[in-house]
Image: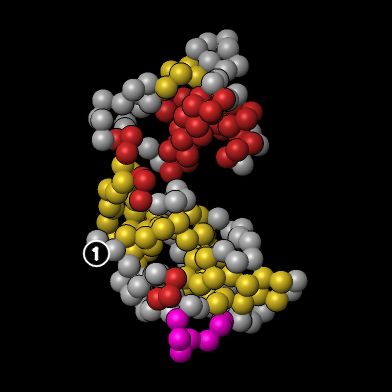
Amino acid sequence: MSLQLTTRQSNILDFIRDRLEHAGQAPTLEEIGQAMGLANVSAVLKHVRSLEAKGRLQIEPNRSRGIRLVATLDPADADTMELPLVGRIAAGEPLFSGSRVERTLRVSRWVFPLKPDYLVRVVGDSMRDEGILDQDIVGVHATPVARHGQVVAARIGGDRFTIKRLYWQGDVIRLLPNSPGYQPITPDPSDDFAIEGLFAGLLRGA
């Protein structure tokens, strides 16, 4: 069995660690499920059991808050994470697909203000005044939900990927660049348009 954590397992472990640190007690399985969007407690238990099998925590029997963290043997592990770098995107395919992973990068988890699920290389300088430059590697926090004013990763027309600031007022959606010479993008209702995630931070020179 691989000891490497899945994205879901990493998120659950981070949530448990945060609750122990700030609340002084472990969350219940129900609370983990609510935080992770998992309605089935048995699914949560499966992930928690996997974390126990990988040596990341212990479960005390017959206790609703009986989860205890186990210190990792790798002192660097707590401060770094491995993220997949997504390559060329095929038409109609979600931005993140296992078949499109070029390689994985181990990076400091403190680089990103928001925890990313994967990395994508930027092509173009339409967000230059946001500090996002051509060939930067951006972290994407995978979610189909975003608010007006957030910088998002979006897919347009099935095979076009872009990082832009989201304008969303009523029924009007636009993707706003932040660099001279670029025009806002207004997705056509017939376009295959989807918000793939939130901009989580960037790496330069990787």
- Left or right of 80? Residue 49 is right
Q: Nearer the viewer, residue 185 or 203?
A: 203
Q: Nearer the viewer, residue 27 or 188?
A: 27
Tag 1, which secondary structure? loop
Name the outermost residue toward the top: 62
Residue displayed at 67% across by 79% down: 189
* Residue 193 image point, x, y percent: 58, 72
Q: Give the residue number, with chain letter if any, for mark 1.
A: 205
Total numbered labels: 1
Q: Is residue 109 above or below residue 137?
A: above
Q: Nearer the viewer, residue 112 or 71?
A: 112
Colouring rule applied to residues = secondary structure
Give the quarter of the image for residue 31.
top right
- Left or right of 172? Residue 114 is left
Q: Is residue 163 above or below residue 112?
A: below
Is residue 31 within the magenta segment?
no
Name the outermost residue toward the bottom: 181
Residue displayed at 51% across by 59% down: 198
* Residue 171 image point, x, y percent: 74, 74
Residue displayed at 34% across by 54% down: 84
Q: Nearer the viewer, residue 54 or 13?
A: 13
Q: Is residue 100 above or below residue 168?
A: above
Is residue 182 within the magenta segment?
yes
Question: Which secondary structure type mostly characterizes the magenta part of the structure?
Answer: loop
Residue bounds of the magenta highlight:
179-185
Q: Is residue 144 visible?
A: yes
